């Protein structure tokens, strides 16, 4: 059980909070597993209609996946996350994304602070997303010398389209709440102080809705998104490019620069 994840059930809602301020709410495998279990266990609870994921802090919702952790900052873990057929088992990213998509409940992200990297990828799988008006988001792998997994990029394309995905991933820029809504990254923008209340109020819409109807509609939407295949030879090219990047000098430079809190000097080698 992760000490960095808290939850409470209030009326018809389970509220899950990320609570790791000393690491800017960077998530690790243990935290993702705990959140996934908390979502999964309410599927059989008829009293709970919605799940809301938010943060204890209101400055940084999450700085992404904890690549600074000694236990996780290894090529082995990077390969597990980014190469589709590298491991026969789901990694924590894939599992939480699947559970969010397949949950019988309405899932809502109340993103009450800046959000980066893989955490945003996961929360794209929520049915609805609120974003605080003063916050920003960014997907920075190109600035860190790391790669990004095919399923994650496909998820962005499914949700916000090719053009917006290209802009977000290739620039590594920071985008504000207005841009986030225009791109479709989020559905609603709220004031920082009221985002959780707004999310809870929105969740009341679903209290009287038919649970089986909600579940069936979600399955149909998921089926369209998930039944997209790529040819083996195309995937082989993607896999080769990932391996090349992970085994490069730039990968090592990106990791070193991140730990030393400086701008990396990439050579393309």
Image (tube, grey):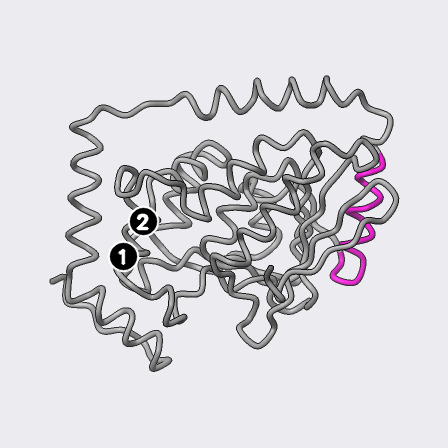
Question: Which residue is more in the foreground, 135 or 1?
Answer: 1
Image x and y of residue 133, in percent: 68, 57
Instruction: Mark 2: give few (<14), some (14-19) or many (20+) Cα within 10 Å.
Output: some
Would residue 145 be seen by someone viewing this image from the given angle?
yes
- Magenta span contains residue 200: yes
Over which residues does the magenta segment extend?
A: 191-204
* 74 vs 233: above or below: below
Image x and y of residue 17, in percent: 68, 58
Question: Which residue is more in the foreground, 71 or 116?
Answer: 71
| Residue 254 picture quarter | bottom left
Q: Which mark is residue 80?
A: 2
Q: Which mark is residue 76?
A: 1
Instruction: Mark 1: give few (<14), some (14-19) or many (20+) Cα within 10 Å.
Output: few
* 47 vs 134: above or below: above
| Residue 141 picture quarter | bottom left
User: Badges 2 and 1: C-beta atoms under 8 Å apart?
Assistant: yes
């Amino acid at each position: 059980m992760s000490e960095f994840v808290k939850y409470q059930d209030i009326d018809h809602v389970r509220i899950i909070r990320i609570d790791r301020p000393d690491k800017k709410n960077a998530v690790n495998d243990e935290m993702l597993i705990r959140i996934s279990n908390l979502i999964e266990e309410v599927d059989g609870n008829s009293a709970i209609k919605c799940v809301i994921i938010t943060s204890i802090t209101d400055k940084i919702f999450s700085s992404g996946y904890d690549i600074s952790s000694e236990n996780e900052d290894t090529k082995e873990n990077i390969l597990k996350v980014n190469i589709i057929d590298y491991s026969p088992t789901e990694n924590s990213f894939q599992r939480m994304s699947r559970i969010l998509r397949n949950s019988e409940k309405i899932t809502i992200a109340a993103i009450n602070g800046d959000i980066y990297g893989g955490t945003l990828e996961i929360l794209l799988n929520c049915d609805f997303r609120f974003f605080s008006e003063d916050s920003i988001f960014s997907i920075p792998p190109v600035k860190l010398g790391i790669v990004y997994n095919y399923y994650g990029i496909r998820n962005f394309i499914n949700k916000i389209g090719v053009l917006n995905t290209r802009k977000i991933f290739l620039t590594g820029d920071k985008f504000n709440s207005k841009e986030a809504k225009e791109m479709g990254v989020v559905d609603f923008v709220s004031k920082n102080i009221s985002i959780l209340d707004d999310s809870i109020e929105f969740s009341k819409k679903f209290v009287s809705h038919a649970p089986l109807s909600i579940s069936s509609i979600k399955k149909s939407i998921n089926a369209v998104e998930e039944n997209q295949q790529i040819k083996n030879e195309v995937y082989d090219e993607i896999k080769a490019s990932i391996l090349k990047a992970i085994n490069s000098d730039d990968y090592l430079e990106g990791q070193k620069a991140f730990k030393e809190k400086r701008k990396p000097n990439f050579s393309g080698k």
